[in-house]
Amino acid sequence: MIGALVAGITGSGGASLSSYESIATYTGSGNPTFIEFTSIPSTFKHLQIRTMARDIFGGSGTDNFNLRFNSDTASNYAIHRLQGDGASATASGTASTTSVSIIPSTILDGSTANIFAVSIIDILDYGSTSKNKTVRYLSGGDLNGSGRVSVGSGLWMSTSAVTTIRLTTGGTGYSTPSSFALYGIKEA
C-alpha cells in the first residue's frame, strides 16, 4: 500500500509496486539507540526506508532520528525541510552537519500509548561512485492535533556507494514494536 502511494505521488516517472524489493526489516526489541542496515547490495537504482517509530524517552511530543551513511560522522551532510503542526509552518536548513536529521520521526513515550510516527525516506542513486547522494523524505506523527508533518531533503557530500545506513534515535532508544524496512527500487 505505501509503495503504491509513493509511486502515485511521484507521477508517471514513479516506480511501479513490482519495482520494490525487500532487502531487510527490523522490528524493535531491547530498545536499541540505533538501527543499522549493512552489506547493502549494489543491484538497485535507489533505496527506500519505511519506518514506524516510537522512542522510550519519557517526554511527550515528537522527536527526530539521524541518518548516516557508511559510518561517516564528519560534517559531510546538509539538510532542508518544511514542517507544519496544523497551526504554523516553518522552513529550515543546515549545511555542513554530521547527519541528515529526519524530523519528526518518532513519538515520545510520554505521549498517548500505541501511537507511532511514520517516515518514508528515498536515497537516490545510492550505488553511484560519480556523484553525491541525495535523500528525500516525508515524515509525520499525529498526537490528536499536536503532532507535526515534514517534507525534506538531505545531501551526503560523498561519491562513495552507500553500503551501510544507520538510523540513530534523537531520544533514548527505539521502543518495541518500532519497525524499519529497507527496500531496493529497480530501474524504472
Image (cartoon, rainbow, N blue to C red):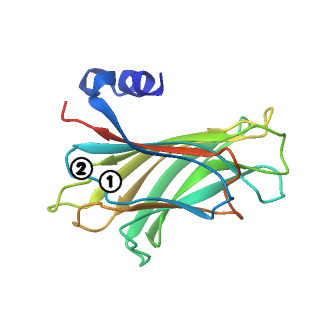
In the rendered image, the residue lying farthest to the left is: 130
User: Residue 55 lies in what quarter of the image?
Assistant: bottom right
| N-terminal label among 2 and 1 | 2
Which residue is labeled 2 in the image?
A: 125
Q: Which secondary structure, mark 2?
A: loop
Which residue is labeled 1 in the image?
A: 134
Residue, x 29% and y 23% (percent of image)? 18
In the figure, 29 relative to 25: above or below? below
- Of discs 2 and 1, which sits in the foreground? 2
Residue, x 36% and y 59% (percent of image)? 155
Which is nearer the eye, 90 or 166?
A: 166
Residue 115 in view: yes
Type of the residue with mark 1? Thr
Q: Where is residue 33 in the image (x, y as percent from the top left)?
A: 62, 64
User: Residue 188 lies in what quarter of the image?
Assistant: top left
Which is nearer the eye, 138 or 112?
A: 112
Q: Do the residues labelled 2 and 1 touch (CB within 8 Å)?
A: yes
User: Residue 132 lies in what quarter of the image?
Assistant: bottom left
Left or right of 2? Residue 45 is left
Residue, x 63% and y 49% (percent of image)? 104
Residue 16 in view: no
Left or right of 184? Residue 45 is left
Residue, x 30% and y 61% (percent of image)? 163
Label annotation for residue 168: none
